[in-house]
Amino acid sequence: MTDDASPLISSAELAKRLGLARRTISNYAQQGLITPALVTPGGQYRWRYEDVVAEMRALAAKRREERQ
């Protein structure tokens, strides 16, 4: 995980950076596949890009391992 100084970004910005739909980001979070750095009082997710990339890489590696 990165330090707390990393900027928080919205789900829309995260989706744009990852080339995914915003709804995909929300679905992944609801499934527990990725973890937001913060959930606002209004229920919106805020992310640290580097943390999500690390979580997705770990998830991809786990899925590859399970296929072998």
Image: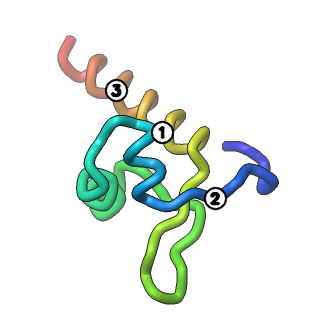
Distance from label 2 to label 1 (Cα)? 16 Å
Q: Give SS at disc 1.
A: helix
Q: Quadrant of the C terminus?
A: top left
Q: How many marks?
A: 3
Picture coordinates of residue 56 (x, y %)?
42, 35
Q: Give SS at disc 2.
A: loop
Along the polypeptide, which appears first: circle 1 or circle 3?
A: 1
Mark 2: which amino acid? Leu
CB contact under 8 Å: marks 1 and 3 = no
Task: Name the residue that disc number 2 marks.
Answer: 8
CB contact under 8 Å: marks 3 and 2 = no
Q: Is residue 59 left or right of residue 24?
A: right
Distance from label 1 to label 3 (Cα)? 9 Å
The residue sitting at the bottom extreme is 41
The label on residue 60 is 3
Mark 1: which amino acid? Glu
Between circles 3 and 2, the one closer to the viewer is: 2
Asked if residue 38 is positioned above or below residue 8 in the image, the reply reads: below
Picture coordinates of residue 5 (x, y %)?
81, 53
Along the polypeptide, which appears first: circle 2 or circle 1?
A: 2
The label on residue 55 is 1
Mark 3: which amino acid? Ala
The residue sitting at the left extreme is 67
Asked if residue 29 is positioned above or below residue 2 in the image, the reply reads: below
